Image (cartoon, rainbow, N blue to C red):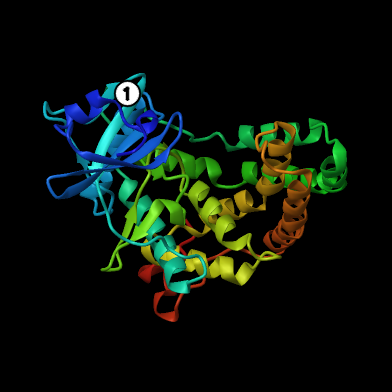
Amino acid sequence: MSPPSILPPPAVLAAYDLADASVTAENYKEKKGVWYVSHAGQTRVLKKLPLSPGRLRFVLDAIAHLRNQGIHIPGVFTTVDGREFVEADGSTYILTEFVKGRNPDYEKESDRRRILQGLAAFHRASRGLRWSARAQAHVQLGSWPEQYADHLERMAKAELRGPFGSEAAKYRPRFLEIGHFARRRLLQSVYAQWVAEVEREGGLVHQDFAPGNLLIDQAGRLHVLDVDSLSVEIPARDLRKVLLKMLKKKPAWDHPQACALLGHYHQVYPLPRPYYEVVAIDLMFPHLYAGLVDKYVRERAPDWSEQKFLRKLWELVRFEETKAQALTSQELLPSLPLRTSRASEGGLPDA
């Protein structure tokens, strides 16, 4: 058994008739926890979530919708009295299926393809989502212009001190210029049209579609885990995050590779050509620089040394600069195999 301090409340296990189960902590924090619960030859996963009941109902409605549309997400078990979750000690808990598999590897081209195609299938399946009256949806639609402005204001006003601050300040004018340029481009783009489409037809983003939240089983199927950050939002948010995580390990922006990754996505869920401009604009914005400066100023990484902050800065500066150069001089469009190059076969319609 796990140490008593990190065991789930007995009332939670009892609600699922698992009071005498074997419990092993996989991950535990104050607001989140994951336990493997073994009973009668079966292993299940108990999760403590940092979500209110209303927000959790939204997530559960989304899980049911996505599973009905063919997305592989662990199923949720009900309690002995039919509840989908348990409230205890100010937290919410769910019990889900246990899935065996391996995490994808960014270094493998086949796994990169699986991730982008899995993300496309996820976005496509999320269309049409409707949630129950008691559910509290997390909606981010239409917030980008304001978010960009907030990031730029914080970046401009940040008090950059010490060795990291002195170095970061050298690049601040350039990244402010790039950020303001991206915001102007955003306001001139079809961003508002895409927002209106998702508002009308439904749609979700995962927000952390990364190897740690994904599993590939023996049959090659991609399973999506940890969906507690689901949000109603345009797919571009996920695309930006996934592409940056895959590509930022390189010393410079790899434009052909970015187009190839979008090609995998486009084969499953084709987007109109102008929507890829919105993706490019969000990639152009200096999110990495802004995030690192914010982390330093707000002391959100107390275990990082000054030298680690400097190393992270030097790693991202060339990547950010080459990314902006490429995205202002070249279109970001999916690279497609010849057999799917026509619009009727998943090509690039103008609208």
Taking 317 as reference, is 173 left or right? right
Which residue lies most toward the top here?
Answer: 90
**Which residue is the site of mark 1?**
53
Q: Position of residue 187 (x, y in %)?
A: 63, 41
Looking at this view, name the residue that lies furthest to the bottom: 338
Query: Which residue is at 18% across, 27% downward?
Result: 15
Left or right side of 142 for 268: left
Residue at (63, 51) in percent of width and height? 281
Residue 261: give x, y in percent of width and height: 51, 66
Q: Horizontally, is 242 left or right of 77 in the view?
A: right
- The residue depicted at 74 percent of the width and 44 percent of the height is 305
Choose between 334 and 312: the one closer to the eye: 312
Q: Nearer the viewer, residue 321 or 146?
A: 321
* Above or below 84: residue 197: below
Residue 212 % position (x, y): 44, 53
The answer to whether residue 130 is visible is no
- Which quadrant does the N terminus fall into? top left
Between 311 and 5, the one lying in front of the other is: 5
> Foreground residue, 66 or 236?
66
Q: Say whether residue 336 is visible.
A: yes
Q: Residues within 10 Å of mark 1 (few under 14, many from 20)?
A: some
Give the structural element (helix, strand or loop) at label 1: helix
Above or below residue 73? Residue 327 is below
Q: How many marks can you see? A: 1
Residue that appears at 37% across and 69% down: 344
Please provide percent x and percent y for residue 23: 27, 40
Quarter of image, res 28:
top left
Up-down: is 102 above or below 130?
A: below
Which kind of residue does numbered mark 1 sit on?
Pro
